[in-house]
Amino acid sequence: MGDLVVLHLELLGFERRFFPSQHYVYMFLVKWSDLSEKLVYRTFTEIYSFHKNLKEMFPIEAGEIDNKDRIIPSLPAPKWFDNQKTTETRQGTLADYCRALLNLPIKISHCHLVLDFFRVRQDDENPPAPHPFKRNETFLMGKEQTRNEKSEITGPIILQTYRLIAEYKKSSKHELSMKAGDLVEVVEKSTSGWWFCQTESHRGWLPATYLEPLEGPDESEDQEPNYEGELYQTAKPYKAEQEDEISLEQDVTIEVIHKLLDGWWVVRKGEQTGYYPSMFLQKTGEKRTDYPVKTLNEGAKPPPRRSTIRNAQSIHQKGRNRISQETYRRNSRRYLQQRGQHANRNRGVQSGQFNQQNKLTSVLEILNNTENTDHKKTDKPNEQKVFPVIPPRPSKEVILERCTETTRKKVSIRNSS
């Protein structure tokens, strides 16, 4: 049986997800040549990257040499931020793109690039963990919707509203200047600590540390500490400016034990812990590609720490719950000790098994040596055997001298009788 190929490709709609931060994924129904039907999820960034790779593989059909020869459909580049409106209006274009893609010559529509892209991945069958307080929202596309038709989706656009605790003046054209008490809607929460926000007339980036939720002082989407730690590498050096921060050089491997949405993560280096800007970190062995536009600028700085904000005015009487570095270090040491004890126990069990195996090996070697010795003796029947010399029998006096007192008494009683 030959390799599977895609027979039918249909865009069903998109899904709005909130974990680890708000983002959108498109849903595709893929029918394969073995008559199986699979549901796959892809972001528009992934789709556009696939489109670029396809053009590089078939430059003539992409019109790179002569535009008259172009048969690969066009696809607009992704915008530098996504919201529900852009995701919704892009569906008609994607639906047309999918139909045109499968109508291309077999050498393109059946190439390994197309097959690999639409093959089911692990996160398609097992989606990422849901947000603890928000459910994913699914928006199905109308059956008759085309590129030129307006979307029939009726799902509500619900964005979280935050309040500024102090005045913020922008330092680049991508940011917003806001006053204390102003309300903004958060469109995207980047892990760098820079959030993309909008007002009625403006859109731009703001530091998350200047924003507070209306419901309470704490950020409900913050994760719990993970003292097992995740391995990260410093992409840029940073020198600590506060006592609870940590200074690290570039290309240093550390463990992240607490990811916070304000862009300041708690990291562990040995037994030392401290805050470090998340925008200067990347997964070990991976190249980070999810930086917002704000961080792509030369000389971009991490968002300011909330403790450094002057004249902060919160509407909540109770302050934010924060874990001290002493608590991080204490819990971290406790976890490392438990992990070390567990490792020692495992080593003890493995050592016992190893010693037992050594004993068994030694016994087998002895048996093999004995067997080999016997074989050597039987291999030479004509060779004269050498017997050990028998010592002479000791005299009666020597025996009595070397035996115990009890034995001598018994011998003397027997002799007297």
Image (spheres, rainbow, N blue to C red):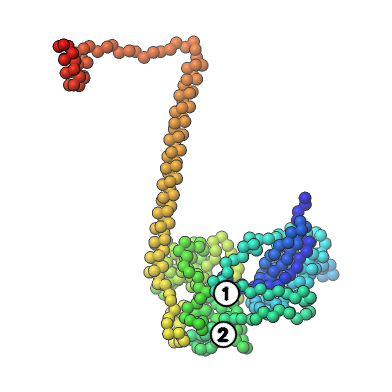
137, 23: nearer the viewer: 137
Mark seen at residue 144? none
Extreme residue toward the left, this view: 416
Q: Residue at x 51, y 16 (%)?
A: 379
- Answer with the quarter of the image where residue 192 lies: bottom right
Q: Position of residue 81 (x, y in %)?
A: 64, 77
Report the amino acid beneath label 1.
Lys
Q: Residue at x 56, y 78 (%)?
A: 195
Mark 2 lies on residue: 184
Report the amino acid beneath label 2.
Val
Residue 297 visible in the current orientation:
no
Q: Nearer the viewer, mark 2 or mark 1?
A: 1
390, 275: nearer the viewer: 390
Earlier in the chain: of badge 2 and badge 1, it is 1
- Please determine whether, in this image, residue 266 is positioned above or below residue 149: above
Question: Does residue 212 appear left or right of residue 105 in this picture?
Answer: left
Mark 1 lies on residue: 134
